[in-house]
Amino acid sequence: MPRQDFTPAFARLVDSGRQSLGVPPDAALPLSRPGDWDALPDAAGRHGMTAWVRAAMPGWRGAPSHVRTAVEARARTQQVRALEAVAQLATVAGLLHDAGIDAVALKGPLFSRWLYG
């Protein structure tokens, strides 16, 4: 799909992903209409990119404060949920280990730690 066919919010998501990979931001992505910015927090949540949008936002001068606040709040909620899930997984993994059962988490931070050290 050509980039000009993206909605402005989706184009910002692509830009956030590019920035997370070290690619310079795309200066051709202005979000000048209020609705363009307002759609960004929901779009980031739907596509699992809230953390990337949060990291990219400091470089976006035109982002309204209410959008920045919404992204920050969603990112904090996402972090809390992730930490709760890690704690639950660690508890289960510990119980299985204590019972002599080898287990591998196939997703998430414990799997990454096991796989990459």
Image (spheres, helix red, strand yellow):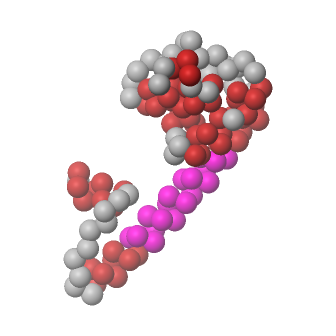
Does the magenta portion include 82? yes
Q: Residue at x 40, y 70 (%)?
A: 89
Does the magenta portion include 78? yes
Find the magenta span and give its range.
73-90
Residue 100: image location, x then y, percent: 22, 85
**Taking 56 as reference, is 108 left or right?**
left
**Taking 7 as reference, is 15 left or right?**
left
Q: Farthest residue toward the top?
A: 28
- Residue nearest the observer in this picture, 76 or 107: 107
Q: Is residue 77 above or below residue 47?
A: below
Quadrant of the image occupied by residue 106: bottom left
**Taking 22 as reference, is 114 left or right?**
left
- Residue nearest the observer in this picture, 29 or 20: 29
Quadrant of the image occupied by residue 57: top right
Is residue 12 visible from the viewing direction of this image?
A: no
**Taking 116 as reference, is 40 left or right?**
right
Q: Residue at x 57, y 31 (%)?
A: 10
Q: Residue at x 57, y 53 (%)?
A: 78
- Residue nearest the observer in this picture, 57 or 43: 43
Q: Is residue 80 above or below residue 99?
A: above
Dominant secondary structure, magenta = helix
Is residue 40 visible from the viewing direction of this image?
A: yes
